[in-house]
Amino acid sequence: MKFVGSQLAYYMSDNDFKKNSKILIKYLAFLGIVIVIFSILFHFIMEFEGQYHSWVTGFYWTLTVMSTLGFGDITFTSDLGRGFSILVLLSGILMLMIVLPFAFIRHFYVPLLESKKNNKVPRKVPAGTKDHILICSYDVIARDLTERLKQEDIPYYVIENRKAKALNNHDDHVPVLLGELDSEETFILANIKDAKLIVVNRDDFLNTKIILTIRGIAPTIPIVALATDIESVDVQQLSGADHVLPVKKWLGEQLANRINAQHAKSKPIGQYEDLLIAELPIHNTPLVSMLTRETDLRNKFGVSIVGIWERGRLQAITGDEKLTDDSVLVIIGNKEQLHNIDELFHDYNVNPNPVLLIGGGRVGLAAAESLHKNGVLVNVIDQDPDICKKISPFCNKVFNGRASDYDLLKKAGILDAPSVLLSTHDDTMNIYLASYCRQLNKDVRIVSRISEARNVDIIQKAGANFVLSYSTLGSEAILSISKGQELTVLGEGFTLFIIPIPKSLEGKSLAESRIGSKTGLSVIAIKENSQVVTLISSNTILPHGAEIVMLGNIEMKLKFNKIYVNAN
């Protein structure tokens, strides 16, 4: 009864109900007037026939005839009376049997069912909820982020102001709250003062309004906002956001950072303590055809190889991997060590032809600017003349047209380009172009963006060497902020894990632990007593009370927990 009462209370306060109830009440009032008129006419016609009945009998007769019950205990004998009976009967069929049920269903029952569905979505978090993350929209970044939060047992709630979308999310078992995003009450009910973080991920204009609303009740809560246009970053920061992430600009820069166009050089992609995690393409270097153990980079330069990218897949290191022109080493070392290894490869030949960029939107523009800044020539293909005009200052040549046109691709340099960067916002198109470009140039390095993480495998099969999505970059950035860590973007689905060494591994060597062979994770460092050790080998002992730093994806981490952590 309490649940039904809460539903009715919500329904009675709803604006749609007030509107519907007025219509239903007006119809019931009209029906009542008709019944009264028929009852009065009943008396006049009965007196005309010489019959006399009470007023109650008049209402009784009118209702029995209109409802088609017709008991037959009171009848007219004249043609006038019988004609009147037919009129009352037909009026009853129309008004009681047809219009009334329709009006009741349309203006009461259906809205009540809608209210019942809407009332399924909670308006506030459970009592005692704290250290949770609030998200203002369930977009592609939020979907990726929430999957990672689940893996790490971090509570979260999505705030949705659209009833239909909130209901769909609730039915899909997404923790969702229904409320207006510009209402302080919504965030009070979400217990924002005890939250760990709030992610503001609507459009740039609404983000500013949400940030100002939050700051009115929670001046210190960390706010991470997403910016579509780079111009809105300052606006959202001035409004009160602690971190504003121009993810599309970052995505373009990250993709540009994976391009092979100059001398082989390490490219830092993240940091742990004072150590840099970097990628090192080895195309056209003496390392090609060597086994990883034969490179001897640790003894020569002090850097450690912690993983290898091969055609878009990160492989753990065993020492027996044979390096190819497509191999990209993931190495770790300090700034001086990386500089020394860069000097080794400076004199080797490079492909001097321009990089081919397909798609010049926000992501493509950011990539073109980054490449131009680093002195890399870029040819661009895009269908939109306005985009071509906007990106032209950062390009060698701009080609307006469809990238699927062979003649245009050939003219843009696909046959000789060292790398192709696919930055259209259509996953299907990027998959098609990856396959097409791979057929036209077997040696080209293909770097691509995607929107949906589920398309990673298929675009890698199509020929892409490196893939990164908007959702992955955004969710990784937010997670890094929530943990107080530097952003490390290794690739689609791969990240840095820092885990206390389980008791089942304490005192064992890395070789004895078999972490790499059992889980696929790459051990890159051990942190003990505030000291980070990266010069590790198969004989390195895993000490008590230390932390182990590893690279891999969520599935690999789950395997690690299942084998080593849950075994304690």
Image (tube, rainbow, N blue to C red):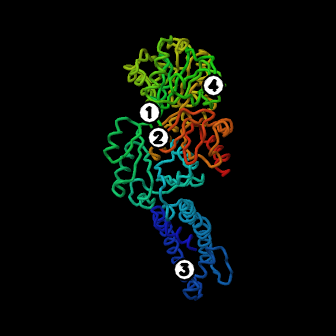
Residue 94 image point, x, y percent: 59, 66
State if disc 2 and disc 1 touch (CB < 8 Å): yes
The quadrant where residue 453 appears: top right
As shown in the figure, which amino acid type bears the numbered disc 1? Trp
As shown in the figure, which amino acid type bears the numbered disc 3? Ser
Disc 1 crowd, CA 10 A, few/some/many (<14, 14-19, 20+):
some
Of 109 and 39, the residue lying toward us = 109
The CA span between labels 3 and 2 is 76 Å
Q: Does residue 242 appear anywhere in the picture?
A: yes
* Residue at the far left in the pictured view: 238
Q: Residue at x 54, y 59 (%)?
A: 121
Identify the secondary structure beneath mark 3. Answer: helix
As shown in the figure, which amino acid type bears the numbered disc 2? Ala
Residue topped by disc 4: 462
Q: Which mark is residue 39?
A: 3
Q: Quadrant of the N terminus?
A: bottom right
Q: Is residue 321 left or right of residue 187?
A: right
Residue 542 image point, x, y percent: 60, 42
The CA span between labels 1 and 4 is 25 Å
Residue topped by disc 2: 477
Q: Earlier in the sequence, mark 3 or mark 4?
A: 3
As shown in the figure, which amino acid type bears the numbered disc 4? Ala
Residue 246 image point, x, y percent: 41, 37
Q: Earlier in the sequence, mark 2 or mark 4?
A: 4
Identify the secondary structure beneath mark 2. Answer: helix
State if disc 4 and disc 1 touch (CB < 8 Å): no
Of 189 and 389, the residue lying toward us = 189
Mark toward the viewer: 3 or 2 = 2
Residue topped by disc 1: 250
